[in-house]
Amino acid sequence: MASQFEARHSGQQPRRADTENQAREDLAMEIKAKTPITDTVTQLTLVRADGRDLPDWTPGSHIDVVLGPDMVRQYSLCGEPSDRRSWQVSVLYQPDGRGGSTRLHHELREGESITVRGPRNNFRLVDAPRYLFIAGGIGITPFLPMITSVDRAGAEWSLIYGGRSRRNMAFADDLTQAHHDRVTLVPADIHGRIDLARILAGVTPDTAVYVCGPESLLCAVEAMGAELDNIGDIHLERFTPKTPTDAPVLDEFEVEFVRSGITVSVGSDQSILDVARSAGIPAPFSCSEGTCGTCETNIVSGLADHRDSVLSPAEQEENSTLMICISRAACPKIKLDL
């Protein structure tokens, strides 16, 4: 799925942009197979063109798929993390989307070459005694390796999986056959929407709650979770960037790129990423929407005006990193580790 990320955590160490999430070199890949999963979902199996092993990844990771000069899309890895020979992503066809799914579904063929970057993980699987996974539609994809991992570890877990119709719920048959006592399918055309109030009311504080799906599902879980004392950690993966409801704190500010020894002004119509690139400072980026986490940068000093959809409210409050493609400064001058 196209991946956008947010998580709410408690009791964590301050977040720092680390090597796991730094942009890696472009990988020349080959589309080894295209497998229809449902009428609207296709799975791509990717292998390295040079035949070498692929980088390690952990459940919750995604990759950037380069589909053109100005077309980069993020998709969750949904295969087996121990498989170093191939990667799998599953893509929902969205005819009214921005063109990425059309290209992958109808234009690219088996045997063709494609460029991939990553993997990165902003949707990490935390240690917990029990897990509740709530998936909506194609939001099931990052949960496939997570479920495999927690099941092998012997943890308690359950999956609530909703979709518009049973026939278009990808991997539903595999999940119910392998884990029939832990998986609850909620096709809307038969059962209506997921009863989130009932499900969340029964969650214990030591349960890690993971949610991935359409914005309506995520907003509902966020709202209900904020009102329930029994909810511990909630981890969300977003498809699209959140719409900021408030204006930027400052129209203009200065940013000092400490390692580069350069200080520049950022105007109201510019991003920190814009001015970094104009100054010749190498800064990795991908989505330019504050959703993929590629441009996450450590803050040396100063206060950030966070506008991203990656960091949780608690992580934003820590003020240790920011996404320079969309976030700004909430003080006259901010210093960044670039």
Image (cartoon, grey):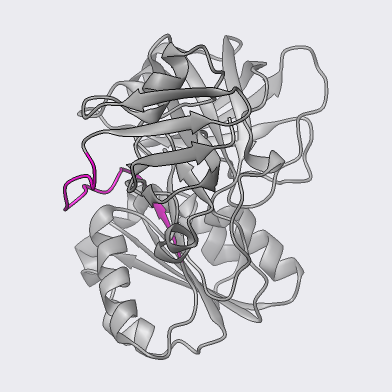
Secondary structure mostly taken by the magenta-highlighted segment of the chain: loop
For the C terminus, give its image quadrant: top right
Q: Is residue 255 above or below residue 104?
A: below
* The magenta segment: 235-250
Magenta stretch: includes residue 31: no
Task: Residue 105 in the image: state x and y as whole percent.
Answer: 40, 23
Q: Residue at x 47, y 57 (%)?
A: 172
Task: Report the side of 215 relative to 161 (left or right).
Answer: left
Q: Residue at x 31, y 79 (%)?
A: 226
Magenta stretch: includes residue 246: yes
Q: Residue at x 59, y 36 (%)?
A: 337
Task: Report the side of 300 relative to 198 (left or right).
Answer: right
Q: Does residue 8 appear anywhere in the picture?
A: yes
Please state which of residues 205 and 77 is positioned toward the viewer in this rendering: 205
Q: Is residue 71 above or below residue 125?
A: above
Q: Does residue 325 appear anywhere in the picture?
A: no
Residue pushed farthest right?
Answer: 52
